[in-house]
Amino acid sequence: MRPGQIIVLATPVFLLLIALEFAVGRVRAKRGTGQDTYRLADAVNSIGLGMLSQISAVLTGLLRIGIYTAVYSAVALFPQEAARDFWSAWYGWLLALVFYDLCYYWLHRMGHESAVLWAAHVVHHQSQHYNLSTALRQTSSGALLGWVFYLPMAVAGVPPLVFGVVALVDLLYQFWVHTEQVGKLGWFDRWFCSPSNHRVHHAVNDRYLDRNYGGILIVWDRLFGTFREEDERCVYGTRGELRSWDPLWANAEVYCGLARDSWHARSWADKLRVWFKPPGWRPADVAERFPKTMFDISKVTRYEPEVGRGVQWFAGLQFVVLLGLVAVFLWFSDTVPLPQAAVWLAALTAGLWAVGGVLQGRLTVTEVLLMEASALATASAALGLEGLHHVCKPLALGIAIFLVARRAMVRGGVTAFDGMLLAGLVASLAGDVLLMGSARLFVPGLVCFLLAHLAYIALFRIGVGLFPRRGVLAVTLLIGAGMYAFLWQGGLPVALRVPVGVYVVVIACMAAQAIGRAAVLRRRDPAAPWVAVGACFFMLSDSLLATNRFVMPLPLASLWVLGTYYAAQILIVRHARQAA
């Protein structure tokens, strides 16, 4: 049985134990003998990060296992047959588990002592609650460097199969220790990682910081001087609080902070040190120019943005559907070609991001439906699911039209600005439908998108005039001319040279108008730059479409063409507002 399938089979057990812990916490909270440690948004965020970790591991896991297998095959100290016999015996399996746990201790410890490793591990610590859902909160980037710490096992001749199994055992063991519902366990706490010991590890209290790294055995901490017993109330989370339900930002937060500090550091040595010094270390010149507030545990507040009960139910149902889709993907992941796996990863990631957005109040329910329909339209095209694609592609723009119309009515009626935005969307919808048809409908579809871009030019002209930055217009036209020359040389049919040329000019003008508008309105309308980004995505999408159609087939063309197309439409729909 493959690792992905084991995780799928274990998931109902995880969810059952989470439900049991939730019920126990509720009962104890009512009796005054304990507390309820669950909040819906936090649990969804934690489990969602675990889902994202598992689906991304289908791609990144090849790195860890591939490198391990290569080292095992090339530099193992013992003959493979003799080593295989030893490690496959019962005592070999047990020793391999202990060996793995020792390697894990040092990976875990260095994950708290080196900033670049902390950037991956921080995901597991971001929750301000401590419960079984926190155990599932895992990084999606840990495999990039974590494999280094397990190479001693490869050198010692531990077969890849044995390594993979003991790694899974070590990981699964750690699930149950993430709970506040189990107290101290006497002698067990002295030898093994237990709920009490691991609560200390997750706490940000001064006396608990960077302690108790053991995965199964806590004796490593006792041997290497990092053990601390639980003797005061734990406060959970990180000292650089995440304060977001965005799973992508959860994974990228610390990397971005390190990149900023590295960029701003004046010394080249400091630019490098930032990544390898302990978390929190900053070059003196950077700390002086960009100071940060010192952590004060007395001022820690839990991040719990308020959303309505209906939104919570919606997010919960969306999450259940995503959980089912992730389970299906993981079950078949080892037989799915890598390009298709990348499509699944992109679509499921978009869904998880959208659920986080609605729970955070950044997205409305309609915006989530728009993003999900767009993701499904893109994925179904890339995977060749024509029936689903023919439903989701027009559905996505239909939802966008509904969103804009409803927003206009709430504000009191459809203005000229709203009318132009709706005209652009309706023309785009017509173009979508026509381009799903036969090849003879390509030119009519092109005309519809030409009308859509003309509507967007008129839209972006309101309040700023036509082409307020002529230099930008010159640049976009030059880029368009270069693209047209590329298509001409690549075999653009003679009959299409004029209509495609006109289209290139119009879309270049649309991008220039949007960028000029952003330049004029950047102080009055902070969202205007996002509209300009959307216009640039339109240019990119059309360039990819034309290249794939007239010059050469692109790998996963539908993913890139439709992905950038829907990114453009969503950015324009969400951020286009008439300036005051």
Image: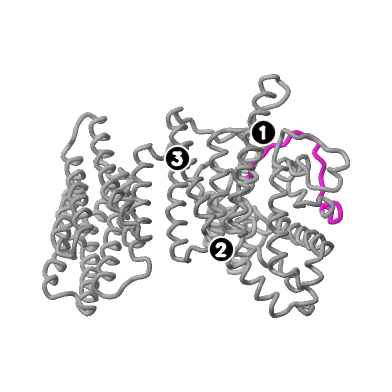
- Dots 3, 1 in contact, CB < 8 A: no
User: What residue do we see at 62% from left, 56% from top?
Assistant: 282
Q: Secondary structure at mark 2?
A: helix
Is residue 425 rendered to the left or right of residue 562?
A: left
Query: Toward the viewer: 124 or 160?
Result: 160
Q: Secondary structure at mark 3?
A: helix
User: What residue do we see at 51% from left, 45% from top?
Assistant: 323
- Rendered view: 76 above or below 439: below
**Spot occupied by residue 500 in the image (x, y as percentages of width and height):** 16, 67
In the image, what residue type sits under mark 1? Glu
**Distance CA(mark 2)–CA(mark 3):** 26 Å
**Spot occupied by residue 113 in the image (x, y as percentages of width and height):** 70, 57
User: What residue do we see at 56% from left, 63% from top?
Assistant: 60
Label 3 vs 1, first from the N-terminus: 1
Mark 3 lies on residue: 318
**Spot occupied by residue 392 in the image (x, y as percentages of width and height):** 31, 49
In the image, what residue type sits under mark 2? Thr
Query: Toward the viewer: 5 or 379?
Result: 5
- Point out the frontmost of discs 2 and 3: 3
**Distance CA(mark 2)–CA(mark 1):** 32 Å
Query: Toward the viewer: 350 or 470?
Result: 350
Q: Is residue 202 visible?
A: yes
* Mark drawn on residue 21: 1
**Distance CA(mark 3)–CA(mark 1):** 23 Å
Mark 2 lies on residue: 60
- Rendered view: 155 above or below 562: below
Q: Which residues are magenta?
A: 221-240
